[in-house]
Amino acid sequence: MAISNNTVKLLWGRAAGICSNPGCRTDLTVLLMDGRNFNVGEMAHVIASRPSGPRGGGTGGSDEYENLVLLCPTCHRTVDKAPTGTYSVEMLHQWKRNHEKSVRTTGATLQFQSAAELKNYVARLLHENKALWSSLGPKSSVAQNDPGSNMHEVWALRKLDTIVPNNLKIINAVEANIALLNALATESFFQFKIHAKAFEQHQHKRLDTYPFFPEDFEKAMLS
């Protein structure tokens, strides 16, 4: 059984497109000189799918999310070629747990001294998200001029490994420093949080509709 597209999206998104090895943390998106990019991440089996494979244990493992960890090609090769017992099943699961927790909690410990500092942090992340949307999204020149291209696949991955993690950073940082915001900015933040949560869910299970990005939040953060 092959690894399903939904499983790939879940694994890639929760790892934010970064190698799960704590000693590596390589960005698994390669940007070429001409502006194109491609992904080098590999969906590594914790328990090999073949019974005789690395950590196979005589029975073999599944192709489901629970038995996969996102690694760069070098780390994947290293953990599979190392002597038996060097990289245990529990170690790889621990790598995955710790990395995914780190992705989801980034920004939660940041402490800013002023609303201006907080807004500058959030604005940088919003600018990156907007740049990706403008360059790769459904209304980008690429999508409009060549609707048959496969750039939608790149857009799908950038939503998972950049936009969703950026949204999490924003939510975590604002919640840790929400006392710095006035009532209007706070209200717009909660609208953003509702949008961000639904947007993430939409990437894994298509929703009929979800709240659009609240422009009032962008205005509040750029003011």
Image (tube, helix red, strand yellow):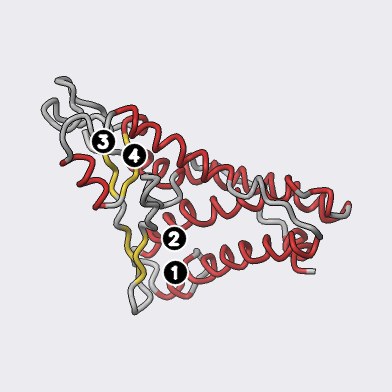
**In what element is the residue under mark 4?**
strand
Q: Residue furthest right?
A: 183
Could you tell me how far apart the alpha carbons at marks 2 and 3 are, in whole angstroms? 26 Å
What's the mark number on residue 45? 3
Which amino acid, mark 4? Val
Residue drawn at x 20%, y 31% is: 48
Looking at the image, tell me whether mark 2 or mark 3 is earlier in sequence order: 3
Which amino acid, mark 2? Trp
- Single out the mark in the foreground, 2 or 3: 3
The answer to whether the residues at label 1 and label 2 have Cβ atoms under 8 Å apart is: yes
Which amino acid, mark 3? His
Looking at the image, tell me whether mark 4 or mark 3 is earlier in sequence order: 3
119 lies left or right of 166: right
Q: Residue furthest left?
A: 52
Could you tell me how far apart the alpha carbons at marks 1 and 2 are, in whole angstroms? 10 Å
**In what element is the residue under mark 3?**
strand
Residue beneath disc 1: 143
Residue beneath disc 4: 69
> On screen, 75 above or below 67?
below
Looking at the image, tell me whether mark 4 or mark 2 is earlier in sequence order: 4
Looking at the image, tell me whether mark 1 or mark 4 is earlier in sequence order: 4
Could you say where residue 115 lies in the image, as x and y percent from the top left?
81, 60
Res 80 quadrant in image: top left
What's the mark number on residue 155? 2
Query: Alpha-carbon neighbours of circle 4 within 10 Å: few (<14), some, or many (≥20)?
Result: many
Could you tell me how far apart the alpha carbons at marks 4 and 2 are, in whole angstroms? 22 Å
Could you say where residue 67 lies in the image, as x and y percent from the top left?
31, 31
Query: Alpha-carbon neighbours of circle 2 within 10 Å: few (<14), some, or many (≥20)?
Result: some
**In what element is the residue under mark 1?**
helix
